[in-house]
Image: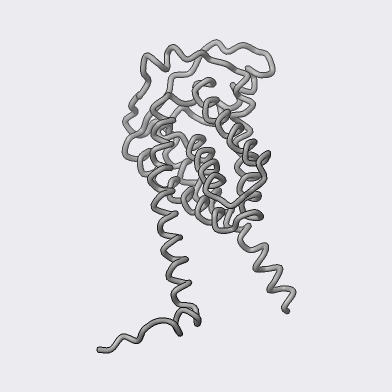
Amino acid sequence: MCKFRNYASYYFPFLFILTIPLLSFLYSLTDNSEHPVHSLITLFDYNIPYLKIFILPYIAWYPYLLFSYIFLCISDRIAYYVTLTSYNFCLIVSNIIFFCYQTTVPRPINIGNDWLSRLVSWVYQHDLPFDCFPSIHVIGCYLVMKGVFHSQIKQRITRLFIYLFGATIIVSTVFVKQHVIFDVIGGILIVEVIFLITLMTYRRIGTRKKQMTPESKENKPMILD
């Protein structure tokens, strides 16, 4: 029984990752043109070249997130909880924005027929050009990068990999014409706000728990009415 509890306490936090696909179903409810559609494209976006090679880091977003959250869960449990909790709230906020302010991004028409172009076409077919602002790809990567930055993880190579690969995925969103620059900025700003609130909340909870330990109670002065 004791071994089971030890296993459960160690492996149960990994199940928290399942909250991501559970909340992702909200995306399918708004990824359509049933709402008024807006465009945030700028002259700067028109000057950004279409580079099909960036479809590779773009589709690597899913394994990148899975690896990063497992790594965080193993290496720094508090950073894992803060980051994943922030991501869930970011998904909720993003889907509210999608419902209230639907945006789209124009895509290239003639993209070729080589294997990279076919991969781009596959992504375009399975991910309609809606629900663009803010970018969920940017939110996922930038949150992981912030989580690792605020963690106690010492492995420099792994930290550097998460930073560099996450940044590559972020820029890939505009190079494969899935997003515009405002989608990137919006994703970063939402992460900054929600991560800060979540981090402060966890710190307050941790402080209260320390204050409620038996040792702190013994040293705590009595309050008389």
Give left or right: position of 210 versus 51.
Answer: left
Which residue sits at x=49%, y=35%?
Answer: 138
Quadrant where the C terminus is found in the figure? bottom left
Residue 191 at what x, y percent from top left? 43, 42
User: Farthest bottom residue?
Assistant: 225
Residue 174: % across, % down: 49, 23
Quadrant in which residue 39 is drawn = top left
Left or right? Give the position of 174 relative to 154.
left
- Position of residue 6 relative to residue 35, above or below, is below
Which residue occupies the extreme left position in the image?
225
Answer left or right for 97 relative to 69.
left
**Looking at the image, is 21 positioned above or below residue 47?**
below
Residue 97 placement: quadrant:
top left
Give the total number of marks visible in the rendering: 0
The structure residue drawn at horizontal position 60% and vertical position 18%, both measured from the top left corner, is 52
Return the residue nearer the eye: 217 or 6: 217
Q: Nearer the viewer, residue 5 or 37?
A: 5
Give the image location of residue 147, x and y in percent. 53, 47
Closer to the camera, 23 or 86? 86
Where the N terminus falls, by quadrant? bottom right
User: What residue is drawn where x is 52% and y is 40%?
Assistant: 140
Q: How is the image coloured?
A: one colour
Whole-percent x and y of residue 168? Answer: 58, 28
- Is residue 34 left or right of 213 when viewed as pictured? left
